[in-house]
Every structure is written in structure tokens, then in C-alpha cells.
Amino acid sequence: MIFTNTKNSNFKAEFEELLGRGKMDIESVTAIVGGIIAEIKSDKNDALKRHVAKFDKWIPSSDDDLKISTESMSKAYANIDEKLKNSLHLAYERIKSYHEKQKPKSWFDTEENGTILGQKVTPVDSAGLYIPGGKAAYPSSLLMNVIPAQVAGVKNIVVCTPTPDNEPNELLLAACHLCGVSEVYKVGGASAIAAMAYGTQTIPKVDVITGPGNIFVATAKKMVFGDVNIDMIAGPSEIGILADDSANPSHMAIDMLSQAEHDEMASSILITPSQKLADEVRVELENWLRKLPRQEIARKSIEERGAVIVASDMDEAVELMNQLAPEHLEVATMSPFELLPNIKHAGAIFLGHNTPEAIGDYVAGPNHTLPTGGTAKFYSPLGVENFMKKSSIISFSQKAINEIGEECALIANTEGLSAHEQSVRVRLKN
């Protein structure tokens, strides 16, 4: 773990290491992923079944065996605890309500000369959603991916999730039933991405693929981009925390560990102007680690990729955090909203002492599929617009083209495109 002060002589080197936290060695797996994609494109379902047998350790008996039945989803939903069922419904309604506010609208603008300009917003026809299922299964990720697609108006939604040993996660199946998803396939990794990108006899080709995954999933998404759209190239999970003396050190420690328990590659970074808080958090991290069921994973993450940085003041702390551009950013200060205007780069921002990152993972409403590794500088959270596209609307009257057609023809002539020029001139009337 990096425990440092911005005044240390080697701080620059330490911080550079943190800036590179999200880098994945995609080149090292590109050949493997390329081979998987090529097999799916050529052999389709036969390749899928080979890959499932190899990576998930079970042998599909037929093409139909790749699909999860709606009956099993319904049964899983019926069997879950009533309190948990109510919790899922609460999450569903809050996520849906938030994303309904995001939905962009078509618009038209009419000028006096009869010109009509506008924008038509339509959903994609189909979306493929990847839901991880390796070290842990994430029903919450299903809700976060399905709901914005449904709000956008996508008619055909395909879900792929790995099922090691042919044992689907029952809570994930229940969440599928709650969301009304009917096409769910027991396929994971790069194979699933390729199947959704190019289609097989069982899994249909989609227009956009969303959802997080490991380095093989991320590499596959990068390689199929252009044949389909994707949401982002997501890396390991991470949290950044800005805190002052008013923060509870025990709360800060468990919030850092809430990301560290995801996997060994996750990163948790606290920046504070308070040396006292930094020292106390260091102690509390160990106190909490001893209690965690996933202690081994969390400990490796914290020790190898965690950091506590003492800044000279909060302005410096904010500037450093903007450079990190974390996936999740907690602002645990006395007056968090005062810092908000200065925060430029973060996937999701959690303001105040009673707003842990975990509340955003499940029931707050905003999407938890977020840009990682500093990509929050140019990427946004998954949302309704990821499942929609825009078309420009243009309509000119005779008066309108007469008014500006000559200027258009002149530009076309200057570029040497005479057909462009003449297609405008033949419509002009003196």
C-alpha cells in the first residue's frame, strides 16, 4: 500500500504509479481473443459449445442447452426471500425512475423561410448485455444494464453470462424475471462478446454491447467495436475518497474495502489534508480486513493497489483527484457541495458522510456501470443514450434554398465537387 505525503521527495513517482492503475495488458491477450472471435465467426454454436466446455467446465448437450429457460427464471423469482424480492423491486423502480429522466427527445426548429431542422432520436433495434459471473455474480449489474435499454425502447435484449459448472446464479435469474428478460444465454468471456457481435444459430447479432468484464471481455469489446457499438472499455473497479477532519476513519476504511473486495486488481485511494485521519484510516483498514469473508482478495488489493495520500490542503487534494479521474468518488467533508464545482472528472460522485459508494451500486438510482482507470476524463456512466442514436432532420423550402443555395454551391465548387455544386444549382430559381 502506498502511504505517502505530497511533500515527499518520491511522491511524483508514487503518483505516476497510481495514474497507471487501470492499464490492462490488452496486447498480451489480443492473439487469444482474436482466435476466439475467429472461431465464433466461422463455427458459431459449435465453437460456443467448445468454449463453454473449456472455460466453464460443463458440456452443453445441445444448442438449446445454451439458453436459460424463462421457467427457471420464474421459479428462481418465486423462491427468493420476500424481503430480498422487495429490495430488488425497490432497486428496479429507483433505477428506472432515474433513467427515465435521462431520455433524450426529438426536436424540430422552423425558420421563417420554411427551413425545418431537427433531430430524431430512436432506440437501436437490439442490445447485448454482458453480466459478469466469475468471482461473484452481479444481479445488480443486470438491472443497471437492462433498465436503461428498456427505457430507451430497445425491443430485443440479449443477456450473456458465464455459468461455471452449469450452475446459474439464482438471484441473477430472479432479476432477469423481474426485468422481463427472456433471452439469457449461459455463455461468458470473449466468446459471448463475439457471439453477440456476429451472431450464431442461437444467439442473435446485436447493435450495441454493454456491460463490464475481465481483460478478455474488455479486449473482445475493443476488437468488435465498429461492427457493433459498445459502451466503454472498463477495467478493474476503483474508488477515490476526498476527506477532511470531519470524516469517520472507520467509515473511510470500510468504503475503501468495498472496492477492494471486488478483486485483487481493484484500487482504493484516499486523499486528505489530515495526517490524523490518514493514520487512523490505516489502523481501521486492518481492523476491518480481519472481519471480511473476502479478506484474501481485499487484502491483496489494498496492499498492492491501495493508497492513502496526505495533501497540503483540500485544493491540492481535489487537483490530485481530478488527475486520477476515479470511477467512484466519495466526498466526505464538512461541506461537500462546496467542492463540487471544482471536481471535473469522476464517473459517479457521492457527496456527504451518509453517502457510501455502495448505496450507488444498488438502490440510489444512477447507473453503476462507470468509466475506470482515468477514462472518466472523457467517458460517461452507462445510460439511456448508449441505447439510442440520433438522426439529423433537414427540410428546405424553395425560398430557403434560394436564400443560401448560392453559398453552398460556391463551397462545393471550391472543393472541386461539381456534382455537389450542380445538385444545388438546378434547384435555384431566379
Image: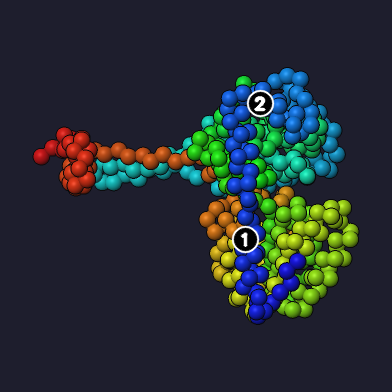
Name the residue rendered at 60%, 61% in the picture.
325
Most foreground residue, 286 or 255: 286
User: Where on the picture, by quarter, is residue 59?
Assistant: top right
Name the residue rendered at 70%, 65% in the picture.
269
Q: Residue furthest left?
A: 430
Res 239 visible: yes
Most foreground residue, 360 or 93: 360
* Mark seen at residue 368: none
Q: Is residue 399 left or right of residue 234?
A: left
Residue that mark 2 sits on: 47
Above or below residue 371? Residue 398 is: above
Q: Is residue 215 left or right of residue 164?
A: left
Separation of residues labelled 1 and 2 (CA atoms): 36 Å
Above or below residue 63? Residue 385 is: below
Residue that mark 1 sits on: 20
Number of marks in picture: 2
Name the spot of residue 279 as percent of width and height, x first.
79, 75
Name the spot of residue 188 as percent of width and height, x first.
70, 35
Name the spot of residue 340 as percent of width and height, x first.
59, 67
